[in-house]
Image (spheres, helix red, strand yellow):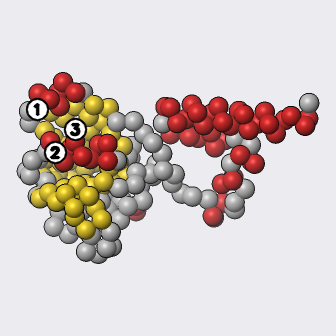
Amino acid sequence: MTQHTPIIGLLAAAALAAVFCSCGTEAHARVLRKNAPAEANPASQAPVSQRPVAQLIPRAVYRNELLLRRGGSPEVRIHLSRQRGELFMDGQLAMDFPVCTGRQNSTPEGAYHILEKDRSHRSNLYHVAMPYFMRLTYDGIGLHVGDVYSAPVSHGCIRLTREACVPLYQLLPVGTPVYISQG
């Protein structure tokens, strides 16, 4: 019985991983990290100072196709504390999507408007591609396709998954209001 324990532990970790991958919630990620045996979770063997701060986590995008097709007056809300974004069309929720904002409060709270759009933008400061860029400030803050982690790790921009950003880029005209808040 004792010689089968590591195999059973690995099978349990694999089952938890399958549940996590299908649901994609942070609660499942915490369960996976907590319950996985050490040999199945290499991050748990590293010293605390070397463990990753954030993990790339697939999180679901909600889309109300009827509202998106119907159109209307769009408004985007970014929630820093939850790392989520929402698109409202005429006051009704049309999309809910994961975002990755700036570390150390580098994504500024406030009311903004999309100032310009650039499908193949490149950062002047960091020299990286920022596809489907929608500028919010003249000092470089915007929405764009990028890696979406479970914690804020960008330099200030709001990163979105391609699945969320491309439709937003196509739907949102220059001038669309974007509200960024802690809530």
Compared to residue 169, the image places residue 129 above or below, namely below
* Among the 4 quarters of the image, the one containing residue 117: bottom left
Q: Which badge, 2 or 1, comes first in the chain's sequence?
A: 1
Q: Badge 2 local density, few (<14 within 10 Å), some, or many (20+)?
A: few
The residue carrying mark 1 is 71
Label pair 3/1, CB-CB below 8 angstroms: no
Q: In the rendered view, does 67 fall on the left or right side of 43?
A: left
On the image, the x and y values in percent for residue 98 come to 36, 43
Residue at 33% over, 73% down: 126
Residue at 66% over, 54% down: 43
The residue carrying mark 2 is 170
Could you tell me the amino acid type at mark 1? Gly
The residue carrying mark 3 is 87
Q: Secondary structure at mark 2?
A: helix
Rounded to the nearest angstrom, the CA distance separating label 3 from label 1 is 11 Å
Single out the residue that lies furthest toward the top: 66
Could you tell me the amino acid type at mark 3? Leu
Q: Which badge, 2 or 3, comes first in the chain's sequence?
A: 3
Rounded to the nearest angstrom, the CA distance separating label 2 from label 1 is 12 Å
Could you tell me the amino acid type at mark 2? Gln
Q: In the rendered view, does 44 fall on the left or right side of 129?
A: right
Compared to residue 27, the image places residue 156 above or below, namely below
Q: Looking at the image, can residue 95 be seen?
A: yes
Q: Secondary structure at mark 3?
A: strand
Q: Badge 1 local density, few (<14 within 10 Å), some, or many (20+)?
A: some
